[in-house]
Image: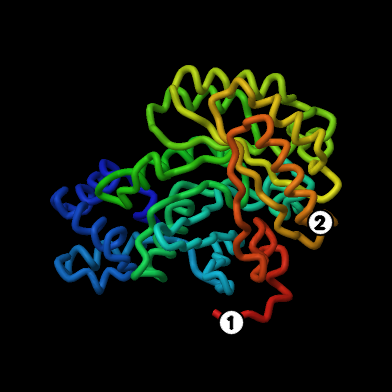
Amino acid sequence: MQYLAGLQPEELKNLLKSINQPPYRAKQILDWIFKKGILSFEEMKNIPSELKIALKRNTLPISLKQKLKLTSTDKTVKYLFTTEDEKSIETVFIPTTKRATVCVSTQVGCSFGCVFCASGKDGLVRNLNSEEIVSQIVLLKHDNPQRPVTNIVFMGMGEPLANYENTLKAIRIINHPDYLGIAARKITISTCGLPDAILRLIKENIQFELSISLHAADNETRNRIMPVNRKFPLEILIKAAREYIKQTNRIITFEYVIMDGINDSKKAALDLAKLIARIRCKVNIIPFNPVGETGFKRVNKETLEEFIQVLEKNKANFTLRRSRGTDIQGACGQLRANKKNSTAKL
């Protein structure tokens, strides 16, 4: 079975050619799937019957199926989708007054084992293909027709740059005007810090946003909470980040999940301010979203305020992110890990 959401324009035109259909039908089909959120060939009104029959014989718009949906009191919606081979992945819809962001997954599980993250608890199962990545957004558009998707963040399950080819193909599909048409600058790739892949991104010539999960400004702490740092310590990571900024002339974001007693001290804040002092970047401070199986705790209000004061005193460029979806197992990997015990209804 072939799934249309993962095909680039020429691939779809070639498919149509193979069943003796004109290439202009490609845009009609794409409009139904991506612009109108129609996932049934029968509902595609300007598609001739013989084409519908041919498409149904060997293709489907998408492969994913919705298994679970949880809605937070803050309107964040978390979805659990199943793949064709019965694997579970998570996607989050985050609406605000001015935008609607979709947080997508790129892998089933994760191999990098950040100790505060539920995604890698059972290791990496497999990469998602480009269709499975794109279809998460298609399904959310279908389920939220009144809220146009404005932003995409590759911050769900898995490491996007460890699934490089599929991630970049998905981005090109997301960005293409005949598909989702989301501007490149509204698409963010988040990585735990793979220097070679970061340098490879320079040549892609796509103006997406790059976000690097930092979470500590010293190697000792980062080694403890992010095993990837043992292979790529801060010196190597920061060198790659600087080169990326130099070659692309773009600002990057460092993500810093702040956790009680781990990386929330005044010294940690000072180390962070010093690390980024001469880098064109901003830091996104994220209070830890509790994940029961990790044992880590959310930073208390007073400690967070002291941490912020140190950053302000040292003129660090930072923002403080408000946590979303804490009442619906909002952290990456929680819903998948707990799906067998969930009593939520579709």
- Find residue 80 and report its image quarter: bottom right
Q: Residues within 10 Å of mark 2 (few under 14, many from 20)?
A: some
Residue 269 visible in rendering: yes
Pointer 1: what residue? 345
Specify the quadrant that holds the C terminus: bottom right
Q: In the displayed structure, would residue 285 be above or below residue 216?
A: below
Percent x, y of residue 129:
49, 47
Q: Residue 221's mark?
A: none
133 with respect to 155 (left or right): left
Q: Residue at x 70, y 25 (%)?
A: 274
Percent x, y of residue 73:
58, 74
Percent x, y of residue 11:
30, 43
Secondary element at image label 2 = loop
Specify the quadrant that holds the N terminus: bottom left
- Find residue 242 and report its image quarter: top right
Pointer 2: what residue? 297
